[in-house]
Image (cartoon, helix red, strand yellow):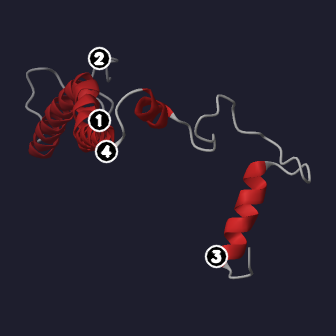
Amino acid sequence: MASFLSCGPLEQPSPTDQPAPEAAAALAAARQELEQGLAQLAELDQLIVDLPGIFERKFAQRLQPLLERQRLLSDDNHALRERLQLALPQGREGQALLNQRPGVPAGSDQAPASQNPANGQPVWRRRLHQATRRLLRLGP
């Protein structure tokens, strides 16, 4: 008579049993894949830590030419202002011309009129219309 404790097809191998060569190879491959996955995960975690610094460096690289251009324009502006001061008459008149806003007649302390008194049309619109007509050679 067979006992309940007899070895059957559902029996688990004991720790002392040697696994089949295919199983050992599959287990080794799975372990190697796990190690590679863990190494890749560690690299990605480090990249996440480094990401703000990478963005800051890239931003600084792209900003550098703009800052250089701004500096050059500022230097040019300063040089042009110096040349203009040398070319303008000295004293109050020269300073007034240097500080004068476009559209304000020389010697006037008033802001330019926003409306043309003749037809109630805004000055900028009338000037735009005149410039467009000149460009299209339609007359003044």
Residue 81, visible in the rendered structure: yes
The answer to whether 124 is drawn above or below residue 71 in the figure is: below
Q: Residue furthest bottom?
A: 137
Mark 2, residue position: 5
Foreground residue among 100 and 26: 100
| Direction from residue 108 to residue 81 in the image, left or right | left
Percent coordinates x, y for residue 102 in the rendering: 57, 43
Mark 4, residue position: 87
Mark 3, residue position: 135
- Looking at marks 2 and 3 on the same chain, the residue that comes earlier in the sequence is marked by 2
| Direction from residue 66 to residue 121 in the image, left or right | right
Distance of mark 3 from mark 1, alpha carbons?
Answer: 42 Å
Q: Secondary structure at mark 2?
A: loop
Q: Which residue is located at x 13 percent, y 20 percent?
A: 15
- Looking at marks 3 and 1 on the same chain, the residue that comes earlier in the sequence is marked by 1
Q: Amino acid at mark 4?
A: Ala
Q: Nearer the viewer, mark 1 or mark 2?
A: 1
The answer to whether 119 is drawn above or below residue 113 in the figure is: below
Q: Residues within 10 Å of mark 3 (few under 14, many from 20)?
A: few
- Residue 59 is labelled as 1
- Looking at marks 4 and 3 on the same chain, the residue that comes earlier in the sequence is marked by 4
Using the rendered view, name the quadrant where residue 9 is placed. Answer: top left
- Looking at marks 4 and 2 on the same chain, the residue that comes earlier in the sequence is marked by 2
Q: Secondary structure at mark 4?
A: helix
Percent coordinates x, y for residue 122 in the rendering: 81, 48
Distance of mark 4 from mark 2, alpha carbons?
Answer: 114 Å
Percent coordinates x, y for residue 2 in the rendering: 32, 23
Q: Residue furthest right?
A: 119
Q: Amino acid at mark 1?
A: Phe
Distance of mark 4 from mark 3, alpha carbons?
Answer: 32 Å
